[in-house]
Image (cartoon, rainbow, N blue to C red):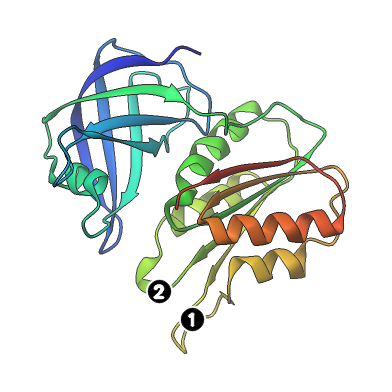
Amino acid sequence: MAVDTYHAHVSRIRDLTHDVRELDLTLEHPRTMAFKAGQFISFEVPKEGMPVPVTRPYSIASPPSISDRITLLFNLVEGGPGSTYLYRLKERDAVIFKGPAGSFFLREDPAKHLLFVATGTGIAPFRSMLLTQFERKTGQPVTLFWGLRYERDLYYQDELADWTARYPAFSFVTTLSQPGSEWPGAKGRVTALVEERVTSVRDLAVYLCGNGAMIKDVTALIQRKGLCPIYREKYY
């Protein structure tokens, strides 16, 4: 799949938490983009002290079936050139990006039980993958384990709950590593959730996205249980 240059404009901004934002970009030239669920686009953005722009990639959170508009999901990183640039954008602002790119994408393997494990905004490519998987109507089991820190970091929970009601083969667990005393859900790191709840890797395909420590730990956990495909995208 060729990497191309795209011109677009910001068509919607939605704040999901105190530091997580969703951005819709409507394509202008070319007017559509073909990509695989899980891939990313890249922006060249200025960085203080650097004579030339730096490249920052962002996973697409919308499905490939919507080809004229893409959704990005990102969190504000203090001093981060990419998120600083994206957070400054306003509706109708023009943007230029390159894409699509990346080898982290949803495979077609209807015999597998799919396990998605995310931390933070690592949920972005999985949102694209899940919507694509639902469109495929394979009926294969799909499980999402998502690790966040605090209650204030929660988002997409209503959307995920709606999907569990509409797609019986889908289930998800959001776990908080530092919850308040009133939190009724799963507690602890998402790694512990994998260790406790994945009892067999037979007919399993695992997708991991988020921080490098989680990816390393979950990879080791899964490999101790047996052999299965593991696809990874490290954010930091």
Q: Residue at x 85, y 42 (%)?
A: 203
Image height of 203 relative to 109, above or below = below
Q: Are marks 1 and 2 in contact (CB under 8 Å)?
A: yes
* Element on which disc 2 rests: helix
Q: Earlier in the sequence, mark 1 or mark 2?
A: 2
Q: Is residue 53 visible?
A: yes
Q: Which residue is mark 2?
A: 151
* Element on which disc 1 rests: loop
Q: Residue at x 23, y 60 (%)?
A: 78
Q: Residue 46: horizontal and vertical position, in percent?
A: 16, 38
Q: Which residue is mark 1?
A: 183
Judge left or right: residue 9 versus residue 207: left
Q: Residue 76: horizontal and vertical position, in percent?
A: 26, 56
Q: Residues within 10 Å of mark 1 (few under 14, many from 20)?
A: few
Judge left or right: residue 213 versus residue 28: right
Identify which amino acid the numbered label 2 is placed on.
Answer: Glu
Q: Residue 195: horizontal and vertical position, in percent?
A: 74, 67
